[in-house]
């Protein structure tokens, strides 16, 4: 099936991991294509998640001024438009972008303005998720979640925690997620990627998110899959990324099909479009080739993505209508 022609929803997408070579050339013309491939793009198989994450460093180093942030954001909108993504939630950690003097508020305001510009320019609808990182102190997590509250009513829609879950405990972040809960801030949280199902249980217990970033290792625990299904917790699944971070040896071992068949709410996502050099169309094609997925799987995952996205009800209905109409034409 030609997934390029189908309208798609992307819920798990890191801004600083998605710089195209075109925008890198704008930001630093000295970077050759060979250097770009080596420094910005992760190999097909990394040692682990920590190894994979090192490829993001070059990205956020080039995102330290207002113009750099604007150009990278608009570049991502062009990529989304080309992939026929009609709604995306773009996430980033504001505190990674203050090395050259921008304040965290200025960083978020700049990306928020660029998202508004990107929506107008491409027609792709989008929200912003602000991330704290696993290695941050409690103060940094609190500063990040307070930015989500500060920008409520703009394109900023939710709070997340990203980074290496295997290397850092949750203790420093419980207060920030409690603050989110008390202030009705929607949350997602990376878990069940670098660590097993115990990490997902811990995250659900202490952070209370409505979605889990990745979460694929939930498939190792039938009780957890049942819990996720019964509580309608949504998993943001990123197949190719999970092979690169060495969770699975190959795509045939990936848990996406098992999670789907168990009836857990899930969506398909890229995670990144440079560190993981892929598109959402390609991710669906891979699942079709590997697990014989078809239009029914695309429709179910897309509708679940819409149901669990952090957009308003009117936009959700518009997205559902576009997806249904496209499916009827196939």
Image (cartoon, rainbow, N blue to C red):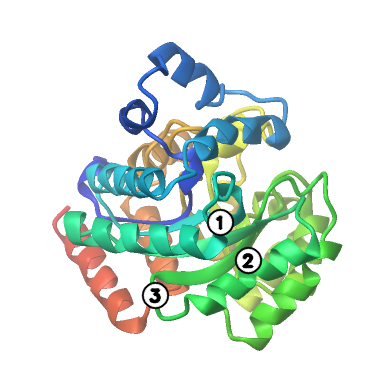
Among the two numbered marks 1 and 3 on one chain, the one whose residue lies closer to the N terminus: 1
CB contact under 8 Å: marks 1 and 3: no
Q: Mark 3 or mark 2: name the one nearer the start of the chain.
A: 2
Label 3, residues with CA under 10 Å away: few <14, some 14-19, many ≥20: some
Residue 94 tag number: 1
Q: Which residue is mark 3?
A: 154
Q: Quadrant of residue 116?
A: bottom left
Q: CA distance from mark 1 to mark 3?
A: 16 Å
Residue at 57% from the left image edge and 79% from the top image edge: 185
Image-quadrant location for residue 115: bottom left
Q: Secondary structure at mark 2?
A: helix
Q: Is residue 166 above or below residue 224?
A: above
Label 1 residue SS: helix
Q: Looking at this view, is 92 or 208 the one in front?
A: 92
For the N terminus, the image quarter is top left
Q: Quick one: which residue is furthest to the left in this view?
A: 329
Whole-percent x and y of residue 150? 52, 78
The residue carrying mark 2 is 144
Q: Residues within 10 Å of mark 1 (few under 14, many from 20)?
A: many
Q: Quadrant of residue 172?
A: bottom right
Q: Work out whether residue 252 can be spotted.
A: no
* SS for callout 3: loop
Q: Are marks 2 and 1 in contact (CB under 8 Å)?
A: yes
Q: Is residue 204 visible?
A: yes
Q: CA distance from mark 2 to mark 1?
A: 7 Å
> In the image, is residue 220 above or below residue 50?
below
Residue at 57% in and 50% down: 98
């Amino acid at each position: 099936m030609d997934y390029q022609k189908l309208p798609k929803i992307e819920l798990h997408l890191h801004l600083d991991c998605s710089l195209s070579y075109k925008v890198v050339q704008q930001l630093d013309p000295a970077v050759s294509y060979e250097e770009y491939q080596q420094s910005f793009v992760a190999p097909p198989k990394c040692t682990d998640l920590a190894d994979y994450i090192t490829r993001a460093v070059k990205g956020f180093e080039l995102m330290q001024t207002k113009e750099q942030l604007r150009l990278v954001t608009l570049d991502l909108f062009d990529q989304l438009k080309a992939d026929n993504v009609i709604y995306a939630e773009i996430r980033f950690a504001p505190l990674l972008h203050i090395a050259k003097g921008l304040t965290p508020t200025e960083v978020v305001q700049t990306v928020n303005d660029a998202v508004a510009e990107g929506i107008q320019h491409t027609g792709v609808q989008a929200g912003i998720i602000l991330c704290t990182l696993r290695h941050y102190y409690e103060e940094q997590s609190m500063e990040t979640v307070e930015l989500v509250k500060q920008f409520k009513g703009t394109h900023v829609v939710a709070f997340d925690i990203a980074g290496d879950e295997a290397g850092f405990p949750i203790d420093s972040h419980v207060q920030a997620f409690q603050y989110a809960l008390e202030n009705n801030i929607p949350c997602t949280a990376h878990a069940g990627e670098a660590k097993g199902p115990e990490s997902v249980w811990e995250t659900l217990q202490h952070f209370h998110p409505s979605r889990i970033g990745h979460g694929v290792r939930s498939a190792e625990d039938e009780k957890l899959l049942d819990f996720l299904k019964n509580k309608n917790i949504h998993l943001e699944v990123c197949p190719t990324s999970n092979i690169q971070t060495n969770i699975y040896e190959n795509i045939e071992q990936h848990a996406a099909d098992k999670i789907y068949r168990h009836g857990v709410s899930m969506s398909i996502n890229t995670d990144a479009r440079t560190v993981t050099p892929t598109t959402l169309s390609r991710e669906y094609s891979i699942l079709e080739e590997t697990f014989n997925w078809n239009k029914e799987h695309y429709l179910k995952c897309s509708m679940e993505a819409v149901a669990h996205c952090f957009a308003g009800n009117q936009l959700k209905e518009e997205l559902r209508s576009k997806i249904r109409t496209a499916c009827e034409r196939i």
